[in-house]
C-alpha cells in the first residue's frame, strides 16, 4: 500500500455532482461502544459490511484526525502492512462478499473546538455529525447513501455523566464498579451516519407524552441543565403542536417510542435532527418572558418544528449525496414555515419569510458565492448550508404547491414518502413525484434547481379605453452567475389581480405562468385603467419591476386584499422616496406619511401586520436597489425620512405607545401584535427628536415585564447618544451578565446599532472579558451582527473590514465552520465604490495569505475574490 497518495491540504479537491457513484461497500449493521471521558474517549466500532455490486476495490473508511489503535477483520487483528491510511481514510483490501470489520480509536472531546464530531460543551459530551462529523468519531463510509442499523453502548462515570442518551430506544442499562455505569440504545430504523448522536451529562428532563394518530404513546423529553428547566415549556408545546400538525396536514406519524431533545450552549448552527435525539443550540429551546423576545419564542417554535419535521423529510427519506441537500432542507423549511403560519398569522409570517429571503438569499444569489439550489460542485460541504439551499429551496416547493393546488400537492407528497421511504433520494425523485402525483409537466420548472441567480421580471401594464382592454407585458431575465453566463427563461408562477380604482375591487386573482422571455396577457372589460397587483403572496422568488405610479402604490397600500401585496406596495412607496432622495431628487414624502398614518389608524388591521408594514425598508435592502451601494447616503436619507415620519405623526406615536401598554405578559397573538406596534411607535417617537424621547424609551426599558419591550427600548437608545443609553446598557449588563443567551443580546444590540462610533465600540467589545471566540453564539452576536450593519461595517475608513478579517483569521484556528460564515459580507465588494471594494479585497487577500487556512475559509475567500 506504499503507493497510496496522500491528499494535499493546501489545494482542496473539488467534489462534483456528476461524479456520483454508488458506494462500493454497504454497512447494514454497526455496533458502537463508547468508553466516555472528556479528554480520552475510546471508540470501538464493529461494522458488518457487504460488497455492493461486482468490483475488486478495497474497503475505504473515512476518518478525520483518527489513528487506528487496532483493525480487525472477521475477528483477526490485522498487521500494519494489511491496511493503510490515505489522507485520513483507512484502506483495507478484502476478498470476500461480506465481512465483519472492527476498529478502535481514541478521541479527545474537550480539545475539539471545531464542534464537529464528539465534543464537550459546558460539562456535557455531545455530538454533531452532519455533514461530515461522524468521521471524526470513528472510521466509516461517511456518505448519506450508506444506511445502517445502529446499536450503541455507552459507559461513563456515573456522577459526571448520569444521563446517557443515543438514537432510538433505550434497551438496557446497569451500574459498574468504580462509580461507573453503562446504557445501550438501539435504533431500528436504518440511517446514514450523519444522523448518529449521543449525549452524556448531568441533565434534567422536562418529560411529557404524545399519543399519535394510531394511538401509540411516545415519551417526550427535553433535556437541559437543571436551572434551565423552567425555560423549556414553550419548546415542549411547540413539539407537541408539530407532531399533531404533521399528522393532520401531511398524514405523517412519529415512529419511535421516545423522542428526546437536548439543549447545548456551544453549537455551530441552529439545531440537528438526529433520529430520535435532536440536539439544539440552547437559544432555540430556552425561553421565558424575562429573557426571550417574541422573535425568540417564534424561533423556538419554528426550529423545534423544523427538526421534528425532518423525521420524515430528511430521516425516513434522506439524501443520496450532499448535492441533494435542498431535498430535505428546502422541503422542511417549507413545512416549518407553513406550520408557523398556521400557529400565528399567515400574512405576517409570509412578510417575515420574504424579508429573510431578500436579505440573505437575494444577496447571496447576486454575488460571487451564488450557486444553484442543487449545486454542481463544492470544496467543503459545510459552506453549502446556505440561504439558497434552505430558503430558496423552500420557495421552489412553495411554487410547486401553488401550481398543483393543495390536494394534488398532498397526493404528491404522499407518493414521494411512500415510494422513497427508507431510501436515499434525489431532488429529481421529488420533482418526479410532484409530476406523477399532480399530473403536471415540470420539465421547464426544473431549471429552478439548475440555474442560480434571482430572475428579474419587468411588468408593464397598458390600457386601451377604446376596447376596454388591459395588456400586461411580462419580460424576464436571469442574470449571469459564476459558471453560468447564459440563462434560459424560467417557468415563473405569477399571481396577479387588476384593481378598478373606482370601486377599489378586482375581478379575481389569477395565476399566470410566465414561461418565455417575453409574454403578454390580455384582460377585457376595463373602461378605465386598472391598477396592477402582482406577485401576490410573493408567488415567485423574483425581483419585480413595474411601471406603477406613486399614486397606484398608495392606492394598493390602502386597498389590496392580498396582505403581502399590500405590504409590498407600501414598501415600494418608501423605497421610491428614499432612492429618489439618495439620488438628489426631491421626491414627495407626504404620500408615504399619509399611507403610514392611514395604515396605523385602520382599526380593521392586525397590529402585527401594521407594525411590519409601516417599518422603513432596511439599509441593506435600499442598497440592493442601487447600482453602487452608498452606505452613508442611504443612512442619511433613511434617518431623515424616519425623523420626518416621527415629527409629522408625533401625536399618533404617543397615542399608540401609551395605548399598547399591557398589564400582564401573554403570548396571545393580540399581545404579541401590541408589543410589536408599541416598539415601532417608540422608535418613531424617539426618531422625531422629541425632547422626552430618551426618557420614554428608558421608562419602557425599566418598566417592561418582558424582553421584547426591554430589548427594543435598549436598541432604540443604543442608536443615539444620551445618558439613558449608557444607563440602560449598564443595567442590562449587570442584570444578565451570568446568562449567556441574554448577554448575547447586549453584544448584538451594540453591534447592530446606528451609532456613529459602532466600529470602535465593536473593537472594544472584542476585548471585553465576556467575549470569547469559543462560543459560536457569542461570535455571531458581535461579529455576525456587525457585518450585517451596513452603515457601520462599510465605514469609509475600512476599519470594519479589518475587524471582521481579524476575527476570521483568529477564529479559523478554532472553528473553521463558523469562521467561514463571516466571509460572505466581505465578498460583496463588487457592489461598492472602488475605494471600499479595494479595501474589501485586501481584507480577503490577507485572510487567504494566512498559513494553514482551513478548507472552509479557503473556499469562501477564494471564490469571493474571483
Ligand atoms: N440539518 C440541520 C438542520 O437544518 C443543520 C445542519 C447544519 N450542518 C452544517 N454543517 N452546517 O436542521
Ligand atoms: Zn434542516
Image (spheres, rainbow, N blue to C red):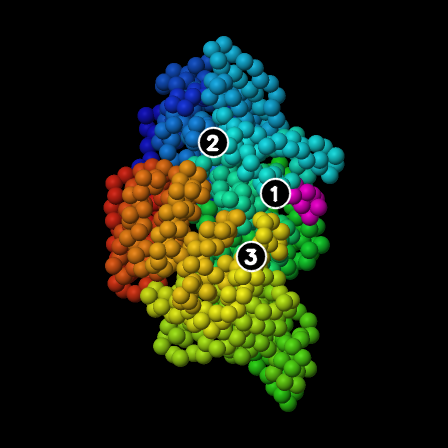
Of the numbered discs in the image, which one, if any, rests on residue 661?
3
Name the residue rendered at 64%, 90% in the picture.
Answer: 466
Q: Which residue lies furthest to the top in this view?
A: 177
Name the residue rendered at 61%, 26% in the picture.
Answer: 169
Q: Where is residue 192 in the image (x, y as percent from the top left)?
A: 54, 34
Compared to residue 638, the image places residue 73 above or below, namely above
N-terminal of the pair, mark 1 or mark 3, is 1
Measure the C-alpha gap from mark 1 to mark 2: 24 Å
Q: Does the magenta stretch include residue 245?
A: yes
Contact, mark 1 vs mark 3 (Cβ under 8 Å):
no
Compared to residue 244, the image places residue 77 above or below, namely above
N-terminal of the pair, mark 1 or mark 2, is 2
Secondary structure category for the residue under label 2 = strand
Measure the C-alpha gap from mark 3 to mark 2: 44 Å
Q: Is residue 86 left or right of residue 276?
A: left
Q: Position of residue 577 (x, y in %)?
A: 44, 74
The quarter of the picture where the N terminus appears is top left
Label 2: which residue? 127
Q: Where is residue 266 in the image (x, y as percent from the top left)?
A: 43, 36
Secondary structure category for the residue under label 1 = helix
Contact, mark 1 vs mark 2 (Cβ under 8 Å):
no
Compared to residue 233, the image places residue 77 above or below, namely above
N-terminal of the pair, mark 3 or mark 2, is 2
The quarter of the picture where the C terminus appears is bottom left
Amino acid at each position: 500500500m506504499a503507493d497510496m497518495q496522500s491528499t494535499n491540504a493546501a489545494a482542496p479537491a473539488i467534489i462534483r455532482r456528476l461524479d456520483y457513484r454508488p458506494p462500493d461497500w454497504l454497512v447494514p449493521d454497526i455496533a458502537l461502544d463508547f468508553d466516555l471521558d472528556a479528554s480520552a474517549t475510546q471508540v470501538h466500532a464493529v461494522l458488518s459490511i457487504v460488497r455492493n455490486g461486482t468490483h475488486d476495490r478495497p474497503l475505504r473508511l473515512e476518518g478525520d484526525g483518527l489513528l487506528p489503535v487496532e483493525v480487525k477483520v472477521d475477528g483477526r487483528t490485522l498487521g500494519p502492512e494489511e491496511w493503510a491510511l490515505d489522507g485520513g481514510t483507512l484502506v483495507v483490501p478484502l476478498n470476500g462478499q461480506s465481512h465483519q470489520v472492527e476498529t478502535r480509536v481514541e478521541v479527545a472531546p474537550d480539545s475539539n473546538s471545531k464542534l464537529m464530531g464528539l465534543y464537550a460543551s459546558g460539562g456535557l459530551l455531545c455530538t454533531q455529525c452532519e455533514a461530515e462529523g461522524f468521521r471524526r468519531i470513528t472510521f466509516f463510509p461517511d456518505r448519506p447513501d450508506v444506511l445502517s442499523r445502529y446499536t450503541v453502548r455507552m459507559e461513563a462515570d456515573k456522577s459526571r455523566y448520569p444521563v446517557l442518551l443515543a438514537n432510538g430506544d433505550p434497551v438496557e442499562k446497569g451500574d459498574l464498579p468504580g462509580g461507573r455505569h453503562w446504557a445501550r440504545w438501539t435504533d431500528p430504523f436504518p440511517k446514514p451516519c450523519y444522523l448518529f448522536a449521543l449525549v452524556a451529562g448531568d441533565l434534567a428532563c422536562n418529560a411529557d407524552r404524545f399519543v399519535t394518530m394510531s394511538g401509540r404513546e411516545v415519551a417526550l423529553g427535553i433535556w437541559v441543565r437543571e436551572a434551565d428547566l423552567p425555560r423549556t415549556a414553550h419548546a415542549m408545546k411547540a413539539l407537541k403542536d408539530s407532531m399533531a400538525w404533521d399528522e393532520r396536514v401531511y398524514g405523517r406519524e412519529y415512529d419511535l417510542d421516545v423522542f428526546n431533545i437536548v439543549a447545548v450552549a456551544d453549537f455551530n448552527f441552529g439545531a440537528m435532527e438526529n433520529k430520535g435525539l435532536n440536539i439544539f443550540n440552547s437559544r432555540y429551546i430556552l425561553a421565558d418572558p424575562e429573557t426571550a423576545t417574541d422573535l425568540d419564542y417564534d424561533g423556538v417554535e419554528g426550529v423545534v418544528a423544523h427538526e421534528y419535521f425532518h423525521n420524515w423529510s430528511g430521516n425516513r427519506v434522506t439524501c443520496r449525496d450532499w448535492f441533494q441537500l435542498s431535498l430535505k432542507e428546502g422541503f422542511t423549511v417549507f413545512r416549518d414555515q407553513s406550520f408557523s403560519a398556521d400557529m400565528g398569522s399567515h400574512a405576517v409570517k409570509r412578510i417575515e419569510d420574504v424579508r429573510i429571503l431578500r436579505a440573505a438569499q437575494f444577496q447571496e444569489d447576486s454575488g460571487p458565492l451564488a450557486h444553484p439550489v442543487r449545486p454542481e460542485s463544492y470544496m467543503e460541504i459545510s459552506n453549502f448550508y446556505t440561504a439558497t439551499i434552505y430558503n430558496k429551496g423552500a420557495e421552489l416547493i412553495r411554487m410547486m404547491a401553488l401550481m398543483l393546488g393543495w390536494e394534488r400537492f398532498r397526493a404528491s407528497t404522499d407518493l414521494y414518502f411512500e415510494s422513497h421511504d427508507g431510501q436515499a433520494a434525489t431532488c429529481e425523485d421529488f420533482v418526479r413525484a410532484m409530476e406523477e402525483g399532480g399530473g403536471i409537466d415540470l420539465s421547464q420548472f426544473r431549471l429552478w434547481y439548475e440555474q442560480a441567480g434571482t430572475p428579474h421580471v419587468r411588468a408593464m401594464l397598458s390600457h386601451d379605453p377604446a376596447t376596454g382592454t388591459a395588456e400586461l407585458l411580462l419580460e424576464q431575465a436571469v442574470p449571469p452567475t459564476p459558471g453560468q453566463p447564459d440563462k434560459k427563461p424560467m417557468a415563473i408562477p405569477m399571481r396577479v389581480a387588476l384593481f378598478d380604482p373606482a370601486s377599489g375591487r378586482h375581478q379575481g386573482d389569477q395565476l399566470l405562468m410566465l414561461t418565455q422571455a417575453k409574454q403578454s396577457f390580455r384582460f377585457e372589460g376595463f373602461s378605465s385603467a386598472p391598477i396592477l397587483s402582482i406577485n401576490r403572496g410573493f408567488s415567485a422568488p423574483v425581483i419585480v419591476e413595474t411601471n406603477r405610479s406613486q399614486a397606484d402604490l398608495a392606492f394598493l397600500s390602502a386597498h389590496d386584499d392580498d396582505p403581502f401585496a399590500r405590504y409590498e406596495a407600501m414598501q415600494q412607496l418608501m423605497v421610491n422616496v428614499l432612492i429618489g432622495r439618495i439620488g438628489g431628487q426631491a421626491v414627495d414624502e407626504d404620500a408615504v406619511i399619509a399611507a403610514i398614518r392611514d395604515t396605523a389608524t385602520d382599526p380593521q388591521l392586525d397590529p402585527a401586520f401594521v407594525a411590519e408594514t409601516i417599518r422603513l425598508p432596511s439599509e441593506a435592502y435600499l442598497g440592493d436597489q442601487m447600482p453602487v451601494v452608498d452606505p452613508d447616503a442611504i443612512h442619511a436619507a433613511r434617518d431623515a425620512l424616519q425623523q420626518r415620519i416621527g415629527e409629522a405623526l408625533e401625536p399618533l406615536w404617543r397615542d399608540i405607545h401609551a395605548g399598547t401598554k399591557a398589564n400582564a405578559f401573554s403570548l396571545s397573538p393580540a399581545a404579541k401584535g401590541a408589543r410589536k406596534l408599541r416598539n415601532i411607535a417608540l422608535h418613531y417617537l424617539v426618531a422625531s427628536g422629541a425632547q422626552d424621547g430618551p426618557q420614554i424609551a428608558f421608562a419602557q426599558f425599566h418598566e417592561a415585564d418582558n424582553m421584547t419591550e426591554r430589548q427594543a427600548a435598549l436598541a432604540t437608545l443604543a442608536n443615539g447618544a444620551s445618558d439613558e443609553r449608557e444607563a440602560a446598557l449598564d443595567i442590562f449588563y449587570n442584570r444578565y451578565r451570568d446568562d449567556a443567551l441574554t448577554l448575547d443580546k447586549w453584544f448584538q444590540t451594540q453591534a447592530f446599532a446606528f451609532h456613529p462610533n459602532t466600529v470602535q465600540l465593536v473593537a472594544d467589545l472584542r476585548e471585553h472579558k465576556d467575549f470569547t471566540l469559543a462560543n459560536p453564539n457569542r461570535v455571531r452576536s458581535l461579529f455576525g451582527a456587525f457585518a450585517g450593519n451596513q452603515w457601520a461595517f462599510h465605514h469609509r475608513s475600512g476599519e470594519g473590514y479589518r475587524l471582521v478579517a481579524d476575527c476570521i483569521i483568529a477564529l479559523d484556528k478554532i472553528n473553521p465552520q463558523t469562521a467561514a460564515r463571516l466571509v460572505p459580507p466581505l465578498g460583496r465588494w463588487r457592489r461598492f465604490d472602488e475605494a471600499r471594494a479595494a479595501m474589501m479585497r485586501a481584507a480577503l487577500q490577507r485572510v487567504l495569505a494566512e498559513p494553514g487556512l482551513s478548507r472552509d475559509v479557503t473556499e469562501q475567500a477564494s471564490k469571493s475574490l474571483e
